[in-house]
């Protein structure tokens, strides 16, 4: 049997309280969908297959460059992070994997970590390397870049760290490495723009060479920050060119927050899917830049449109195009909410977009597109997007052993109070201590 962090009896009790209301909502929605020729049971089964990975760094309270206001009971190491991730999966049944970040999550006992995860029914998605910060005791600084650094010794250190991440990931059962570097220039003239990318590619070739046969490498682009004039891997064009140059195991990762405002991200998704280079996602939301706000909290329509492209690509793949399986991961920073609550809500919001996209009448959409019936084409998308599929999501969760209302159940279980006692804040990091 699987280990549960929250008492299973409590979840069952919570679901029993919700049962009558959920059954009524589900029946009403089922009737409405039936009139549109849609079988609610098929959608609920599909919803139950959805999975998005939780970022290990997301379960601690985030911060900005101005301040960090710690929360209560924050996990103090990767083992405690896994416990929080287990809660998220237990209640949502939508987050069966965790994406680790090294060296933040480094452990001398990967076997113990793997066993703990397996006990909770969790696996590991892509591991992330970190050459955007210096670590204590490190031989060389990344102040002037890592994989692109002009100094060969710095590049070698950054390459070695990435290969180390692959080794750790292998021990944990991971199958991909995500590489995001903040390398770039703050001043015109600081970098030879082409030279920096050449050095990046040289470094990445060495890392690529260390990938096991069944691994992928995800290249994550980001428009700006910490480099404010010219980021080496700033856009999907550069990412695509590098992934193409490196080979079939290299693909592009789209972090929704890493684009200029108003960028048509769903079109980037369509392009990368078309050319077989869509590796995966970091889901989050933003208003201005790399805000790392909760998925679906600012622009849920954009999230839906991204999933609309993914549904189209999946349908084409079924027709024999390719094996299309981009990795879905969250990448958020929770500064003012309980991270577990934010991650549960966000996983459900991404799952909602996935189900709404499945509701799009693709035959009707194609016919409207062929006939240039612009208005009806747009309305076909809107009809799916406007449908409140909450009852489907809740039913899928309950049937899979999760909670009808994950946040309600989590609060009633008093998990945060429990960990606040068991995990006293580390001396010196608790800020005001008024948490
Ligand atoms: C960079 O902004 C980023 O999105 C990358 O994915 C990093 O690995 C992550 O954030 C770290 O916080
Ligand atoms: Mn990211
Ligand atoms: Mn980011």
Image (cartoon, rainbow, N blue to C red):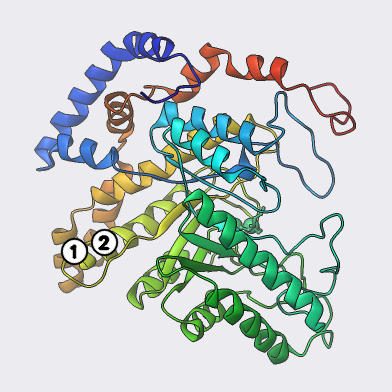
- Residue 328 vs 146, above or below: the answer is above
Residue at 43% x, 27% y: name it.
90
Q: How many marks?
A: 2
Q: Residue visible at 47% across and 17% down?
A: 409
Q: Can you say which quadrant of the picture contains the N terminus?
A: top left
Q: Sort mark 1 into few (<14), some (14-19) or many (20+) by Cα contacts within 10 Å.
A: few
Residue 314: image tag: 2
Question: Is residue 131 among what the camera can see?
Answer: yes
The quadrant of the picture occupied by the C terminus is top right
Q: Nearer the viewer, residue 418 or 274?
A: 418
Residue 199 relative to residue 35: left or right = right
Residue drawn where x is 63% and y is 31% of the image = 80
Q: State the image coordinates of residue 110 (x, y, percent, origin top left).
A: 58, 45
Q: Is residue 114 left or right of residue 368?
A: right
Residue 322, how many percent across, how many down?
A: 25, 71
Residue shown at 68% from the left, 31% from the top: 75
The quarter of the picture showing ligand 1: bottom right
Describe the element under mark 2 as helix, strand or loop: helix
Return the x and y of residue 246 as percentages of the image width and height.
50, 82
Residue 48, picture quadrant: top left
Image position of 193 with respect to 124: above or below: below
Q: Position of residue 336 (x, y in %)?
A: 69, 33
Q: Is mark 1 within 8 Å of ligand 2?
A: no
Residue 184 appearing in the image: no
Secondary structure beneath label 1: helix
Label 2 to label 1: alpha-carbon separation: 6 Å
Residues at discs 2 and 1 in contact (Cβ within 8 Å): yes
Residue 84, above or below 127 = above
Q: Could you say which quadrant of the image residue 342 lies in?
A: top right
Q: What numbered label is drawn on residue 238?
A: none
In the rendering, which numbered label is found on residue 318?
Answer: 1
Q: Is residue 39 left or right of residue 153?
A: left
């Amino acid at each position: 049997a699987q280990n549960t962090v929250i008492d299973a009896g409590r979840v069952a009790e919570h679901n029993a309280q919700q049962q009558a209301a959920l059954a009524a909502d589900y029946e009403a929605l089922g009737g409405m969908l039936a009139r549109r020729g849609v079988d609610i049971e098929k959608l609920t089964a599909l919803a139950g297959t959805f999975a998005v990975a939780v970022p290990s760094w997301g379960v601690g309270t985030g911060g900005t460059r101005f301040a960090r206001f710690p929360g209560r009971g924050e996990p103090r190491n990767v083992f405690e992070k896994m416990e929080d991730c287990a809660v998220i999966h237990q209640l949502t049944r939508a987050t069966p994997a965790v994406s680790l970040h090294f060296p933040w999550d480094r452990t001398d006992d990967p076997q113990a970590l793997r066993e703990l995860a397996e006990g909770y029914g969790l696996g590991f998605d892509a591991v992330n390397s970190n050459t955007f910060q210096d670590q204590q005791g490190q031989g060389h600084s990344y102040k002037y870049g890592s994989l692109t650094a002009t100094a060969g010794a710095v590049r070698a250190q950054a390459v070695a760290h990435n290969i180390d991440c692959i080794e750790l990931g292998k021990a944990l059962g991971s199958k991909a490495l995500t590489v995001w570097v903040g390398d770039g220039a703050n001043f015109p003239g600081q970098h030879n723009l082409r030279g920096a990318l050449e050095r990046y590619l040289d470094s990445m070739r060495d890392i690529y060479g260390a990938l096991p046969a069944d691994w992928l490498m995800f290249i994550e682009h980001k428009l700006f920050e910490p480099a404010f004039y010219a980021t080496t891997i700033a856009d999907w064009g550069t990412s695509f060119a590098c992934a193409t140059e490196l080979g079939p195991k290299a693909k592009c990762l789209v972090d929704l927050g890493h684009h200029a405002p108003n960028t048509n991200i769903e079109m980037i998704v369509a392009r990368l899917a078309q050319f077989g280079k869509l590796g995966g996602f970091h889901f989050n939301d933003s208003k201005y830049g790399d805000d790392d706000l909760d998925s679906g909290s600012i622009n849920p329509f954009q999230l839906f449109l991204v999933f609309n492209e993914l549904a189209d690509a999946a349908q084409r793949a079924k027709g024999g195009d390719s094996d299309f399986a981009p990795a879905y991961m969250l990448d958020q920073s929770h500064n003012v909410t309980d991270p577990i609550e934010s991650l549960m809500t966000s996983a459900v919001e991404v799952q909602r977009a996935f189900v709404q996209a499945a509701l799009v009448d693709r035959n009707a959409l194609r016919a409207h597109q062929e006939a240039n019936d612009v208005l009806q084409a747009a309305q076909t998308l809107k009809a799916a997007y406007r449908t409140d599929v909450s009852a489907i999501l809740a039913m899928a969760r309950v049937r899979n052993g999760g909670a009808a209302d994950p946040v309600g159940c989590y609060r009633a279980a008093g998990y945060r109070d429990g960990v606040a006692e068991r995990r006293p804040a580390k001396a010196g990091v608790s800020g005001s201590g008024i948490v």
